[in-house]
Every structure is written in C-alpha cells, then in structure tokens.
Amino acid sequence: MIATESKERYIAAFEQSQSNGNGAAPAWLKKLRRDGIASFAAQGFPTPKDEEWKYTSVEPIASLPLAQSQGSERGIDADEMIAQSFADATCPRLVFINGVWTREFSFAPGLPRGVRLTSLAELIKQDEPLLSEQLGRHANYRRQAFVALNTAFMGDGAVVIIPPGCCLAQPIYLIYISSPGAGPLVSHPRTLIFLGAGSEAKIIESYVGVDEGAYFCNAVTELIGAADSLADYYRLQREGRSAFHTGTFDADLDRGAHLTAHAVTLGGSLIRNNVHVALNGEGAECVLNGLYLGEGKQHIDNFTEIDHLKPRATSFELYKGILNGAAHGVFNGKIVVHKDAQKSDARQVNKNLLLSANAVVNTKPQLEIYADDVKCSHGSTIGQLDADALFYLRTRGLGVAEARSLLSFAFAGDVVGRIKVDSLRRQLDDYLAVQFRRV
Amino acid sequence: MLDIRGLRAKAGNKEILRGIDLHVGAGEVHAIMGPNGSGKSTLAHVLSGRENYEVTGGEVIYRGEDLLAMSPEMRAREGIFLAFQYPVEIPGVSTTYFLKAAMNAVRKHKGLEELDAMEFLALIKEKLKLVKMDQVLINRPLNEGFSGGEKKRNEILQMAVLDPVLALLDETDSGLDIDALRVVAGGVNALRRPDRAMIVITHYQRLLNYIVPDFIHVLFEGRIIKSGTKELALELESRGYDWLKGGAAAVQ
C-alpha cells in the first residue's frame, strides 16, 4: 500500500516538475525523462517478492515523504563534509550539494587539453552531443525501478570525458554531499564517465551526508570504456546515519578495455549497490573489489552482475563484508557468460566476517553459462574471527579487544590494499584502524 | 621461576595431563621429550593459557604468582612466550605491523614508553640477523605463504623481539631440514641467558644436538616418567621409549 501511494506521489511530482518549467530541456532529454517515469510507473518499487530484492525491503525508502532537492541548504559545513569524503585537496574535483553542482567548492586546475570535467546541468544547456548518444543507454531504466526514477528526475551530476589516448595522472574526485534542511530530501545525481580509446583515468565518486535528518540519495553512474581504455574507478559511500542510498553503477567496456571498480560501503542505514558490467568487446577485463562494513541496524545489499558478451574477456570479483551489531549484509554475484563469449575467465569470491551473534549475511552466487569453453569459479564464506589466530595474537601480548580489531583490520586490509590511489588508501586505512578499535 | 605441581588437564572428556611435576629455575633449559600423544604440546598450551583445555587439578606458580589465573595476554606480558608448532597465518597484517603492536603491548605493561617506527625498525633489523631472515619477509602478511622453515624462524624472531623470561618451544624442529634447524637452533642458543629459562618440547633427539639442555624429562601418558641430564637423550635415541613405558605401566 505504502509503495503504491508513494509511486503515485513520485509520478505526480514528475508531472508537476514538467509543467512548472523545471523540466526545460532538449527534446531528446524530455523524451528520456518521460520514458524513465513511464518505466517506473510500470515497475513500481521492487518488493522482496522480486528475486533480485529477496533480502531487501525498500519500504522505508518508499515511505519517506517526497521533497525534491533544491540545492545547497544553509548551515552546511561543506569543508567538513569534503574531508569526510576522503578527498585529496590537491586533485581536481566537482562538488555537489543535495544533487546540485556547487561551483565554489569545485576546481579543476591544469587538466590536459580535451579533458572535460563539468556539471551535467551545464552540459545539458550546451546540448553536448555525447549526452544524447550515451545517457540512458547503459543503465537500464526499463528493468530497474531506481534507475527509472533517476532517469525521470535527472537534472545534475558530473560528466567526465577523457579524450582518446589521454593519460590522466591525477585522480578526479566527484563528491556528492547530502544535507537535508527542515524536511526530508530526495536527490537523483547522475554521472556520466566516458573514456576514449586508449585513454587512462582514475575517478573517485564519494557520497557523504550529515547524520541528522532522513534523506534518500538515488545515484546512477554510467561509464563507457572505449577500446583499450584503462579505468580505475572508486565508489565510496559514507552517507549519514539515517540515510537511504541506492547506487547504480553501469559500465560498458569495449575491446581490450580494462576497468577496476572498487565499492567501499561504510555509512547509511539502508543501502543498495547495483553494479553491472557489460564486457562488450573481445579481451575486455573487469576487476570488482568490494568492502562493506555494517553495524547497528544497517542493511547493506550489494548486487553485482557481469555480462560476458564477447570472447576472451575476464572478470575477477572480490567482495568482503564485516558485520557487527544487528547489521544485515547481502551479496548477490551474478555472472552471465553468453553464447559467443568463448574463452571467458570469470572468478568470484565473497567473504563475510560476522563479529556478533545478531549480525546476518545472505550470500548468493549466480552463474549462468551458455558457452562451452569457459573458466568460471565462485566461492563464498561466512565466518567468525578465527579462534587460533586470536589465541596466537594473545600469546604475543595483545588483549582480546586489540586482537579482534587487528584481525578485522586484516580482513578488510585485503581489499584496501588493492586501492591504487595512495592518499585514498592511507585515509581509509586510518579510518578503519579507528573504527575497529571501537569493536 | 616456574613450579608445576600435580598439574592435570583435559580436552573435552579426555584427560591428557595426569599429574605433572616440574621445577624450572632461571637460566635453565629443560627438554621435554616423549612419543606422540603423550601430552607435550598440551603442556605448552596449558602454560600459555589456551582455553580449549580445562585444568582439573594442580597448580602452576610462575615467579611467585598463580599462572593459571592469568589470561594468555597477561602471561605474555609477564614474560611467557610460546613458539608454536604450527604458527598461524594472518593475511592482511604484516609481521612488522603485528610485532610492533605486540611489543608495544608488552612495553606498556612494563611501564616502558612505546617505541616509535624508527626505533622499532632498528631493533628488528638487529634481530633479523639472529635468525638470518630477509627483511622483505617481514613486510609480507604474517606467515602467509611462508615455508615451514620461514615460519619457525619468524617464531624465533618474535621471541627475540619480545624478550621473554620463560620461552616454551613447541616442536620447533618439526618440518625443518638440517640447514633450517641449524639456523633456528643458533637463534635460540643466542637467546640463552642466565635470567631466562626455556622449555624445549621435541619428539626427536636431533634438536638436542644443537640446543643442549640442562635437564631432560620424558613425558608419557600425561606424566613425567623419567628425568635426567643431557645424557638421557642419547640413551633415548639408541633405545627408544619402549623400555620406559614398561616402567610407567608398573608405576600405575
């Protein structure tokens, strides 16, 4: 019932935004938004009856009163929020407050010629051709209700374009800050990343928010990796304590393109991360690294899906979760090897550490293989801290709490160690060291 | 330094230690030998505080204190060190990081200041020489992918760094080839001191050619059935344990 009422509210809000002029846009975008809301109307909010949402109820999201974001609220300490995002002050960045680009905190000094780092709203005004060619082509709004919602309401976000052959040494930061004012807040940031043939870039998307007040951030990112491009992509989620976050990352990789996508989930109360990678060219390669930490009553659902569409593509996936308190973690790792994708190599590992008796994890590998000459493996574990290891550390003088925190840190370190941006890895290491000391 | 009196312990429902009496003085090296399943490793683990064993009788006095009342970490901070027969692998933590945390926990307990990174590095470099270990190894995850010999050297390195009062070496020779055994034994010998005692647990006499003990005890079915000096090891090598087992049966 709540879901149906809420659906109607979203549809009504959409119609209102179209009629009051907020929807001013080129014809292709108006149509895309219309398609988005129509798809959402057809699908409605997902329920646990949907196999892909079996362990996650979005009712708390659906029942949040709807208020469209109006950009920056007064009284927000943006510097503090930017610090929380693990940003590097020396690197180019775009900062968004409640889904709207904020010029005063953004800067992009000395980017190589042809690199574009711009707000989506600005590019829509210029009617940049790449937008109509790529937006909505990858993240599938027809199949995913939250992508449909984002598509219907998309207004601002980041666009990163790396021209062919360009190798960008400095990482780019895209920082999304949520800070609800008097009432609840809903935002739908949209990010588009395009890597030209043979180009190389490191991109960090960071979602942060204040602890006071409920809000819902529904973010969608599309990444297109042209032939032989090299993307090192990070998605950090450190939303406020009462926040709801649904994040979709959809990547499309051409021949020989390589993507490493890290997903680090630390904050929020109800979190769903959807990752989809289409290995859409021969020899494309993706590496997915995930780390999720849950405590209290946090609910963190990671849904990953890799499509092997062409021959000789490889995918390696490692997701690790540490859950304390009464936290609930979900991992779903779907790998589809299509008929033409001979010589595919797909490996998936999910490991979970439960630090308390009330923490829960549901983990589900899902392999669908339609080619006959492939290598595929998967494995998942759920366990407590190793008693032998704990004793070993205690015989060296470490107390129980210290030994537990060291082992938790070590468990996470396996994923953190794969982060190639030094400043980010160091900050995350420090953050985790403090976090686990409290465990 | 250490007085074990009538110590009995069981694992599950099985009584493994059935009345151990042993006195270890400062500076002494005691070897505990015996066939498989005689309770040697259990004794080492009970002295270190392993919770899998239940002490059902007797007492252990360590430097005037009731050892069995202390937690494993407190025993470690008070100077007891166990070199494991099977050192645990801990992916994600380097030996350096782990050892610095351990050493500072011990120093804090002793009321000493924590060492900073530079001081620690200088100390560890010196100790590495003792066990002929490459520094590269200690920057790798603790024991992960280490060979048997590397793991045992790492145990002795930890012992050297933690500077214990009483060291328990549990089958430190198992799985080592002769070259590795020499290195490990050399490290142990260099750590012998008048104010430090050692209990060396081994199945084979071979180790005792390199670490020469002051006393040897034969453990069988949870009791010490024979004690002697280093010559006893040679006798055990030529005659095995069987001649003693008869005597043990007669005692029962």
Image (spheres, coloured by chain):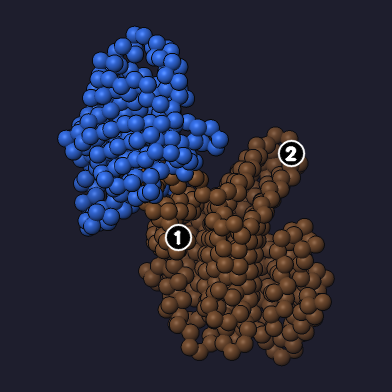
Chain colours: A brown, B blue
- Label 2 sits on what residue type? Ala
**Quadrant of the rendering where the N terminus of chain A is positioned:** bottom right
Q: Name, please, the residue furthest toward the front.
A: B251
The quarter of the picture where residue B64 lies is top left
Q: Secondary structure at mark 2?
A: loop
Judging by the rendered image, the residue that carries numbered circle 2 is A371
Dots 1 and 2 on the same chain:
yes
The quarter of the picture where residue B17 lies is top left
Residue lying at 38% horizontally and 71% vertically, measured from the top left: A89
Judging by the rendered image, the residue that carries numbered circle 1 is A436
Label 2 resides on the chain identified as A
Q: Could you say which is closer to the camera, residue A141 or residue A365?
A: A365
Q: Is residue B222 shown above or below A342?
A: above
The quarter of the picture where residue A213 lies is bottom right
Instruction: State which mark lies toward you, 1 or 2.
Output: 1
Left or right of residue B156, residue A377 in this image: right
Label 1 resides on the chain identified as A
Residue A362 is situated, as x and y percent measured from the top left of the image, at 67, 54
Q: Is residue B30 shown above or below B63?
A: above
